[in-house]
Image (tube, grey):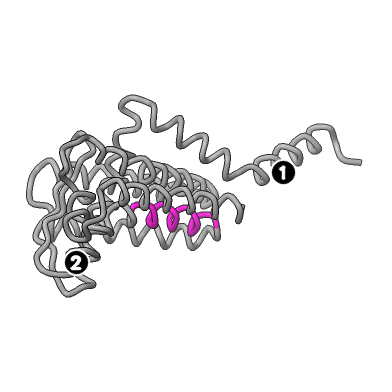
Amino acid sequence: MPSVNSSLLKKNTSFSQKYQFWLFLLAAVILRQLPFISIPFNWLETYFHEISHGIAALLSGGSIIKIELFANGAGLCTTLGGNRFLVSFSGYAGAIIWGAMIYVSAKSHQRVAQIFSLFIVLLLSVTLILWARDLLTIFICLVLLVLILLSLKTKNLKTLQLLLQLFGMVVLLNGLYSPFYLLDGRSIGDGATLANLTLLPELVWVVIWSSMGLATLFLLAKKS
């Protein structure tokens, strides 16, 4: 006959598995509000935003000149050539996709989580070597590198899974919120660039990116 403690443990495990997505979403919402602690996670989303610009440039025949990351969570990827529309669109869209990929890969299997972490380490290392030109960007990339490496150092792969799921959810949530910062009346940034290229108002692109984020959250929730 199972003990009371064993039954409670099974119930708690069942609850956490059933509502895992919502628990991670709640944790990500709370984490975004915490001063200082939220800073490296904001940098992580910004990094994936900027590297998405760069990857889009590379895939469309262009090149990356440099990537800059700033302490306030802003960033800049300077590219040469490539498809200007694809490069401009890929920043916010890419951050959402990266967040979802991190979350899903971590959730799927412990070994997959480990491999994907190593891939992020490789991507950050390449960025440091090839595209980081200023001390602040180098510092931020090193902080992010340490963050991922510390996660990899955990002896329990289940813990790595949980950490990566949290990282992915924070990146995804930040990617959902970030487009709204474009509505500042200054007409600068990716939305303004796309508005000039397509004659569609900047607000339309903000809605598209935000809808992508909401749709991704919905799909992850449904899958969970």
For the residue carrying disc 1, how many other residues have a C-alpha within 10 Å: few (<14), some (14-19), or many (20+)? few
Whether residue 143 is visible:
yes
Residue shown at 39% from the left, 57% from the top: 97
Name the residue beneath numbered marker 2.
Answer: 57
User: In this rendering, which labeled residue sits more in front, label 1 or label 2?
Assistant: 2
Residue 14's tag is: 1
Q: Main secondary structure of the magenta part?
A: helix
- Numbered range of the magenta stretch: 95-107
Q: Amino acid at mark 1?
A: Ser
Q: Amino acid at mark 2?
A: Ala
Residue shown at 40% from the left, 46% from the top: 151
In the rendered image, residue 218, in percent from the top left (x then y), is placed at 54, 50
| Towards the viewer: 181 or 77 | 181
Task: Look at the image and say whether residue 73 sits in the magenta stretch.
Answer: no
Upstream in sequence: badge 1 or badge 2? 1
Residue 83's tag is: none
In the rendered image, residue 142, in percent from the top left (x then y), is placed at 22, 46
Horizontally, residue 104 falls left or right of residue 191, namely: right
| Towards the viewer: 148 or 54 | 54
Residue shown at 34% from the left, 52% from the top: 95
| Towards the viewer: 151 or 64 | 64
Q: Secondary structure at mark 2?
A: helix
Quadrant including the N terminus: top right
Residue shown at 28% from the left, 48% from the top: 145
Q: Secondary structure at mark 1?
A: helix
| Residue 177 occupies quadrant | top left
